[in-house]
Amino acid sequence: MVLGLALVAVVALTILLAPDGREVPIPSAIESISPADQATVLSQTALEINMQPGYDVDLFIDGMPIPPGEIDRVEATGMYSWRPAPGKTFEAWAPGLHTAQITWVKVAGPPEVGEYRWVFRIQ
């Protein structure tokens, strides 16, 4: 039942974000994300976000905010990474679909804010 509801949510989100079926492009502030949107990955996977330098990122997994102290940040290069572990917000990836969301604010230069959301599956 839960998996069915999650699948319905993913389909609805996909239609909402790209109603004509096109892939939603990654915003230019983001250089890369891993795992990629719609990817299927192993439970050891770390979430990695490579931003253009000069941005501060907030991370949400399945709607839950990840405290900044849990995120490995290399602000000079714009690299952010997080993985579940004992004592963190999530201690392990549960098998199934997960939604990652980042919001960002540009901290250098002209102001800019944005957000991006994607879905991946843990085997």
Image: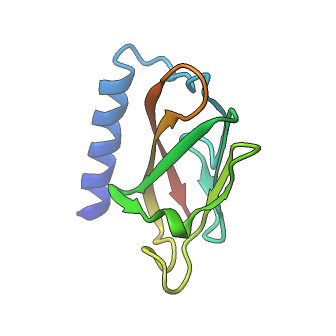
Compared with 113, 2 (above or below) is below
Rendered residue at 38%/13% (across/down): 20
Q: Residue furthest right?
A: 77
Q: Quadrant location of the C terminus?
A: bottom right
Residue at point 35%, 42% (across, down): 10
Q: Quadrant of residue 1?
A: bottom left
x and y, in percent, of residue 79 in the image: 70, 48
- Which is nearer the eye, 26 or 15? 26
**Colour pattern of the rendering:** rainbow
What is the x, y in percent for residue 81?
A: 64, 58
Residue appearing at x 75%, y 45% in the figure: 76
Examine the image and state in which quarter residue 27 appears. top right
Identify which residue, 100 or 4, lies in the foreground. 100
- At 76% across and 43% down in the image, what residue appears? 77
Question: What is the residue that sits farthest to the top in this orientation?
Answer: 20
Q: Quadrant of residue 25?
A: top right
Which residue sits furthest bottom?
Answer: 86
Q: How many marks?
A: 0
| Residue 65 vertical placement versus 15 (above, below) | below
Residue 49 in percent (x, y) is at 63, 46
Q: Is residue 43 left or right of residue 58?
A: right
| Residue 102 in the image, given as x and y percentages of width and height | 47, 44
Give the left or right position of residue 96, taking residue 49 as reference: left
